[in-house]
Image: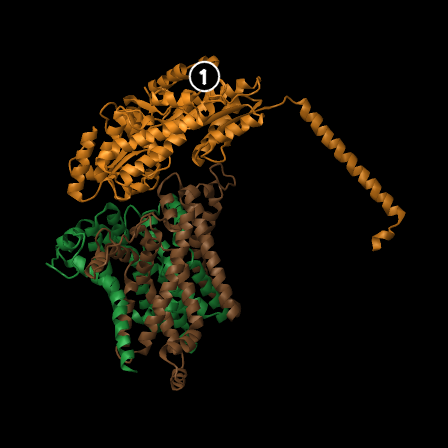
Chain colours: A green, B orange, C brown
Amino acid sequence: MRPWQKALMYILIVVILAYFMFPLYVLFLYAFTNPHYTFFRSYPYLYPVRLTLKNLLEAAAPSLSGPAIKSLVVATLVGLITLALALPTAYGLSKINPLISYMVIVLLFITNLMPSIVIAIPIASTFVRLGLYNSDIGLALAQTLITLPMAAFILLGTFQSIPPELEWQARIDGASLLKAFYKVLMPLAAPSIAAVYMLSWLFSWDEFTFAVLLSPISPTLPVEIYISVDRGNLLAALALSFVLTIPAIVLVVLMQRYLRAEYLAGGLKG
Amino acid sequence: MTHRQRSPRSLSTAAIAAIVVVVVVVVSVGGYYAYISMRPKPVTVYLYVSLAPSELSFYENTLVPQFEKEHPHVILKVVQFSSASDEAEEVLTLEKSGSVPPLLVQIDNMVVGQLLYGPNGTVQSGYVIPLNPYLSQLLSNVTLVPSVQHVMNYETTAFGGIYFIPVRLNVPLVFYNATVFAKYGISPPETWGQLLNVAALIYNKTGVAPIDFQGHGGASTPTELFQWMTQAGGNPLLFNDSGDVYAMEFLYNLSKYFSPRYTTGYWGSYKGLVSGVYYILDYQWPYIYGVMESEGVNMSHIGVYPGPKGPVNAAHLAGGDVLVIPKNEPSADLKYVLDVAQLLLSTPVQHDMLVSLGWPVVNSEAYTNIPSNMSVLYDNIEEAIDEGLVFRPPVPWITEWNSLMDRAWTQIIVDHAPYNEIPSILSYYNQQMYDWLKTNVGPQVAEAYEKGYYGPLTG
Amino acid sequence: MRLQRVSLTTLLIIPALAYVAALVIYPAAYAVVHSFIGPNGRFTLANYEALVPLGLKLAIITTLVVSFGAIFFQLLIALAVASVIAKLTRARSTLMTLVIIPMGVATVVSAVLFSFIFQYPGGIANEIMRSIGLAPVYWLNPKHLPIVYMSLIIADSWKTTPIMILILYAGMLRIPQELYESAAIDGAGPLRRFARITVPNLRSFIGISLLIRGVSEFNIFALPLILVGYNPPFLTTLTYELYSSAITVNESYASATILLALAAILIAIVYRVQGGRR
């Protein structure tokens, strides 16, 4: 590589990093700087001045606990429901003609391409009738739509990669189907199951469209952030954003191996 | 190719079969018609409405059976206007086609003006019949709410007769977040000044701009502004009399405390109150109370009251529907049309409308025996009605006024015109309205407009 | 035994399919059907006609322009970033980790952050403009749509480009290194190698990433809702605004159906293009 090419390369890297890191820098800057130097100025300081924890402690506190608990409960439920639906599906699919199982997975992904807002409005009116509107379980049921295809796909791949002889051997030794699944397959698939759980949790943690339409009265954190913006309370919105983002970033870094495009296909919705 | 060589025998069989079929058909059809014409002919009466699905099913499942039971040979058909925005236009089309069935029309009071005035600008040449000869029948056993009585008195002075009768009212109320009010020890503001203070207080304590306003534009915003200007003693149709200017200047100051997305506030908007985006929903139709209840909102968090009183009066804008009978060939069937109208105004039906549909109604005797879970709402509706109602005058050019008022609103409040330009901006729209009337309706109407001949109908 | 196996596996799959049918197919059909039904329960186009004065045309234009603009922008960035990372000899995974972090940031949060960046008057972007001696810009001025569209595309791509980078990077790793080496011996410069080797070999990966991003792009909702509210409207925000008022819910079904139709057309187009190549 010639020197000018190398220089160009470094410049490119800096520009790339600037684009992808700068908004995060803004998050930290606004979260920890005395608001007199950021929010309350029309032209904010671009470097940290007078660092403080007051923003987070004071702005986030009043509206944090309810939404944070709701988000935690719903995300946990989404992880559980996803596994409850995806484990039997993936196991069943791993036992049939790969062409058919592929078609089922494609079908799941295609339904996932449906705009959330299109289906969320009819779901909302049905939920009002069923008493599921604003409930944790109702929202979790809807958000699982986003995670199910990815979960079924990852788990199908895992089950297919486990040699069938292991399971047969267990069955010959007299284990029931359930027991063979539990004793032989589950331990081998454990890492994938954990990954599916955490990815589902992450999607639910960040999800907005279903949350704002199906549970507006008891909001999740993303919806509470939106409500704060709508009220004009940007300091609270920013502080809540910080709380929402930290676990998400940690999960992304930990889960990097599983953040593969084909897994996420429909999952990353606006 | 083979059927060309059919034998004569099979041909004649086919011919006989065909003749038999024809004879059977002719005899049965003829017999059926003979049978029909022997029977007493049922009369069909039509009721045109523009209703939500639940309301329509009330009409079809409760009202129609009741009417048809009392009138065995009459069929009552409830017909929904095919588009909610052009109700008057549909009646006019029917009138112009010349074939009008026996027909009663329940229509929004805002558009009834389009039916009142005929081609030469008089009510006599209009499209609906005067109801005076039938009033004693229609209003037997009915005590009208006083402000509705005032409207009918106005009709008599303005048109020389009664051409429409209100059948249901709609009175906007103020909804608020009772929890937040209780937390800061605030009681609902009773005057405009208190409203400003309460808004400032909540804003300073919570950082939340607390008021939502129907700022979306369309017909919604001008309708709400009509009430504000009337409460300041103005004639909203003029845009720029002292009351109009006072109201607009007040709203300009109040808009500091408007929730940031107030420009999406519209008829039926309530979601922000429920999710805590804002704490005061400034005037909304009462039916959202039932909508919130059905969504599982804990209603003890929602306060409702008639709203602050204006500097001059506390008039509440009356929305709702009126009854008209379109002009028709003289016919004995008119009797049945009147019977339908009488039924709609009768105390039991009005009580059902109030309780099952949440409609404020016009018959004051219907306001008894209200179920307890709704009584909070109805007490406030009744109080609002008692404080006085204001009707928009039934002028056919109300839509033009709406769109001009909408523009004035956008320029002054949404786009923050300088405060001291408010009077001149409003005068500009007064001039626009005048010019429009002069060109499109006629100089006399324009002059009458400028003199304030058309204005709010208060009671 | 064989029959039993088949029925058992079918039984295992049915819950997931039933769940999807109940929560996707039924609601979508419900929305489409009800968009054509008036209050009298009969067929009508009134719900669609009512959308026209509410800004339907602008919503469609905005949705299309921002969607296609964003996809194109993301493709350019992703190609550049992926090829830079693929060229690196050190710190590849570190750079990749940093680049994909925005994926974990909620859309709502990215919208809040860009609302500070594109604030007017003032704001972070304008502070940068000022420090290099340029005039401030009203980035989200609803009366000047091109610049709003541009700002929205930049804001949206921050969070959504990483997935494209991942796909294209995976594709680049599959291109045999010898192709580049022999091209370099033939004297082809880096740009030429990119155009002659990288892009043609990445075709199917570009197709997949366009499909995945394209459909999601039609659905962007939280970002415009927070950054620009309802002005200019997107089909999603228009739908939500109509839904928010109790009297225009039927019209929200009509707007949702238009959104659904656009997404379906896009899927069909990409499917044909992809299928034709196979």
Q: Position of residue B316 (x, y in %)?
A: 30, 26
Q: Nearer the viewer, residue C40 or B208?
A: B208
B378 with respect to B12 (left or right): left
The three-letter code of the residue at mark 1 reads Leu
Report which quarter residue A7 is drawn in: bottom left
Mark 1 element type: helix
Q: State the residue position of label 1.
A: B138
Q: Nearer the viewer, residue B367 or C64?
A: C64
Image vertical order of residue B197 relative to residue A98, above or below: above
Q: Position of residue B204 (x, y in %)?
A: 15, 41
Residue B7 visible in the snapshot: yes
Q: Nearer the viewer, residue C263 or A9?
A: A9
- Number of residues whose C-alpha sits closer than 10 Å to that of mark 1, classed few (under 14), some (14–19) or many (20 or more): many
Task: Give the quarter of the figure containing the C terminus of chain B.
Answer: top left
Task: Give the quarter of the figure containing the N terminus of chain B.
Answer: bottom right
Residue B287 visible in the snapshot: no
Report which quarter residue C173 is drawn in: bottom left
Q: Position of residue A204 (x, y in %)?
A: 31, 58
A51 with respect to C69 (left or right): left
